[in-house]
Amino acid sequence: MLAAMRELALLDLNVRCKQTGLNLSAIREKHGEYLTPLLVEDSEKTAIVYLLQSISEQPGVVKLWSEEVTPVKAQKLPFVMSRVAAFGPIMKRTFQNGEQGPTLNTQGLTEKSFAERGQQNTRWAAYFREMHNTLFCSHMLVFADQSYSIGAGQIDPHVLAAAIRLIPEKKTVFLAVLDSVGRWPGECSEYHAYLSQTLANKYITSSAQAYNHAHCPLCGATDVTLYPNLRGTGINFSNMDRIGAFPNLDVKQGWKSYGLCLDCADLLYVFKNHLLTQQFTGFVAGDKALLLPSLLGNSDGRRQFLIDWRKYINAINDAGNKIGSHENDLLDFVRDRDDSQVVVHILWATFGQVVDDVRGVVTDILPSRLRELSKINRDLNHWQHPLAPRYPLEDATFDLNLTLLLALLKRPGGKRAAKANDSSQLFAIKRQLVEAIYHGVPLGTATAGLWRELLITARWRLDDIADSGNFGGLLYEGYSDKGNKKIHYWTLAGWMKHLARLLYYLDSIGVLPMAAPNTEPLHFEPSLAALKPYFQSGSGLNTREKAFTFLLGILYGKVLQVQAARGVNVASNALTWLKRLNLDGRDLPELYCKIREKLLNYGVEASADVRAIVQDLGRLGGQSIGDTIGLDQTVTCYFLLLGQSITVDVLPSKIKTTEE
């Protein structure tokens, strides 16, 4: 993945400087004005710059004037913060509590620093000598048509002090020095060379120093200096602070495991700070992730991919970002590409000043698979099936980012459920499910984990209903129509219908089959006409045991409905029969008896429709009633709740009785 990040950053730099195929060394040498601003603080946040320049016709005289910092000029002001001497000939003139800065003490340290750099045997020595002469060896400053004498016996000991004092703004502004021919610091290749070497300090630590004459494991460069502090790039996939991570358990040997050459380190820094958050992060299954394209094919094709991607992002931004969040990312863009052009990797991590604490990875997602999923998503968002939600929730829409996994596995309860929603087990299952969906492979052994998390979520929803007393959510989807405002919201019944749609989706894409291979189809037709559509393909009702449990769930829902209408405390009565979803097939006979007893007591079996379902239960149960109902906890609870969720659709509150 680091190689893909490196390549994207290099491609981006080539596009910025309108070149093709340049390596970073060439860009640093010939187009440093595009690279250096990306390695330092954003200069566009400061609105005004004051400029100093020696007047060539008047030796010792320096002029001072101000300009607005435009995006073009910001590139010429690669500012680096320093708490002691100024890093270079770009400083910030501050104004705080009525005092201007930098202080005279800091100015003195800057004078000493510039003088020392001017004496070194480096490419930038002559440049710093000129900067030193302008700031500290001149005798007059011209500003706003006035001349100010500088030096011994004057108000200001040098030009830098005079400029800081005379700038009138009572806010932070830039103060920069131009060279004798009028070049801004960001236009001087020798200053870029100085910055590239000096800024490399962020890629080392006091205990893990640079190592010379080595081989870069990322780009293959030989006889280069390696910098071991990967964290300094802002990407810390291998934690530098983890003692014992290095050969021989010695942090000083860190370069052997994680060392990168300066060009690679700078490219990763550019990717993290200027590409990642702006272009390559999104939400997958509800969790923030890096969406990383790994480009294939020839160099022209890779370059064109990045150009097209930037146009796509700009078009979305120009449209006011009105496109849905799931449309505004890389997956939708990549799906229309060819498999020979690109694959996508997904990485979940903590995104802050540093990208670290990697939680999960899915690699090599093909565009052709994304196209296939897009078509299935469109169909499933308009699923025509009796089990389909009547009031679909927007956050459960099928999209390439699999946003609905967050909605369907989220436990209600706000802060009370925060820890449960952030559990490592829940995330692990989501990651495995995402991988299976994107790769088109069976979920396999992770299936048990998915059902475990779904059952946990269902228990949270039942507890939430019991606590709130909103028992309508057991039977009705969440819908409110007040005036012209229609609101859809989550209930247990609605959640079950959305879950049924998800399971159909997983079956249709080969991730979680509803039936085992070679399973004989169920030959059963319910007596009640309203029930017949539910037994069509897509419901998962493919065995007599499942059908029995489903029908029993409908009658259980009827008991809940009647008890709620009669003012019975459902939470301490019928709701307890579910044993917090700790039921399996062996518990169904007892549950059947309780339901029948209540239906008789409430006179509900006077309904012809209810009696038809009771008769169908007898047809399905037959000799199976007893301990031979071999359904596990997962299947039992799912079909019970599924039947409960359609009770009001099949058995509305006003039903015909025999007498009627």
Image: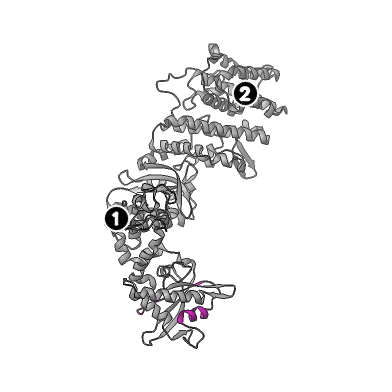
Image quadrant where one finds the C terminus: top right
Whether residue 568 sits left or right of residue 83 in the image: it is right
Q: Is residue 179 magenta?
A: yes
Q: Earlier in the sequence, mark 1 or mark 2?
A: 1
**Residue on which the image places disc 2:** 556
Label at residue 214? 1
Q: Position of residue 370 (x, y in %)?
A: 39, 41
Residue at horizontal 53 percent and vertical 17 percent from the top: 629
Secondary structure state at the residue bearing disc 2: helix
Residue 362 appears anywhere in the view: yes
- Badge 1, how many Cα within 10 Å: few under 14, some, many 20+? some
How far apart, in angstroms, are the residues tagged by discs 1 and 2?
Answer: 72 Å
**The residue under label 1 is which amino acid type?**
Ala
| Residue 308 higher or lower than 567, as above or below | below
Which residue occupies the foreground of this view, 380 or 625?
625
Instruction: Tell me where the magenta segment starts and ends, as one range.
Output: 157-181
Q: Residue furthest right?
A: 567
Q: x%, y% of residue 649?
A: 59, 28
What crowding class fits label 2: few (fewer than 14 Cα within 10 Å), some (14-19), or many (20 or more)? many
Q: Nearer the viewer, mark 1 or mark 2?
A: 1
Element carrying mark 1 = strand
